[in-house]
Image (tube, rainbow, N blue to C red):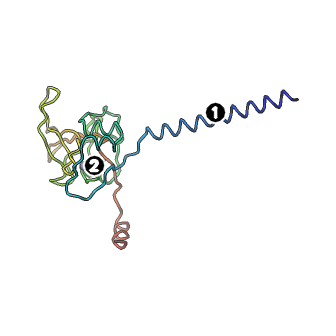
Amino acid sequence: MKSMHSSCEKTMKLNFLFVFMIGMMGCFACKNRQEPHVYAPTNAKHLKKSKAEWEQLLPTAVFNITQLKQTEKAFSGRYWNHHKQGIYVCTCCGRALFSSDAKFESGTGWPSFTGAIDLEAVDRISDQSAGMSRTEVACERCGAHLGHVFDDGPEPSGFRYCINSLSLVFRKKKTVEEHVHLKKQE
Ligand SMILES: [Zn+2]
């Protein structure tokens, strides 16, 4: 009887340990699986931060792409196969960059757009790295690297803005009712 009791207690302890460990693993996974997020939201015309400041603020994967100009693996990002209506803003500063209206299926595995949301939204910079001649696309407000633009896109613009999902945060399009409600609150 005594041994049964102690083995039961032992099992309970093990169960507790197991649940605790699963919980800890869950927390760890949450921390690593960063939700899309604007890390330094601002309405200022320009945002200037040093690389060291961005490194403090951003998760490593986001820092590597937006500040070190790396490219995420094709078909790995959150938005290449994303079809909701809304706008995509800069993950660093929150600047509106692309609209879902301009998104198209390029088959490349990266979110692709025929153009930016407005003429000033992105800067186009000549990029001669990696033995290629390309045009880099960066956020006009904070300079975050977004991706590249190519001239093999669909008509009428003919452009293909090939953008890293990790540079973007999607914002759902608000309904007319939501807009009216928000206006009333201002
Ligand atoms: Zn930005």
Q: Is mark 2 within 8 Å of ligand 1?
A: yes
Residue 100 point in image, percent of width and height? 28, 51
Q: Position of residue 28 (x, y in %)?
A: 49, 37
Q: Quick one: SS at disc 1?
A: helix
Q: Amino acid at mark 2?
A: Cys
Is disc 2 surrounded by few (<14), some (14 to 19) or many (20+) residues within 10 Å? many
Quadrant where the C terminus sits is bottom left
* Residue 134 picture quarter: top left
Say the numbered circle drawn on residue 18.
1
Placement of 183 over or under 29, stated as above or below = below
* Image quadrant in which the N terminus is located: top right
Marks 1 and 2, the one that precedes in the sequence: 1
Residue lying at 69% horizontally and 31% vertically, measured from the top left: 14
Q: Residue furthest bottom?
A: 184
User: Are there few (<14), some (14-19), or many (20+) residues within 10 Å of tag 1?
Assistant: few
Image vertical order of residue 15 relative to residue 183, above or below? above
Tell whether 104 sits left or right of 151: right
Label 1 vs label 2, nearer the camera: 1
Q: CA distance from mark 1 to mark 2?
A: 40 Å
- Residue at 27% from the left image edge and 35% from the top image edge: 107
Q: Residue at x 74, y 30 (%)?
A: 10
| x and y, in percent, of residue 69 in the image | 23, 36
Q: Residue at x 77, y 33 (%)?
A: 9
Picture quadrant of residue 104: top left
Residue located beneath label 2 in the image:
90
* x and y percentages locating residue 49 in the rendered image: 24, 47
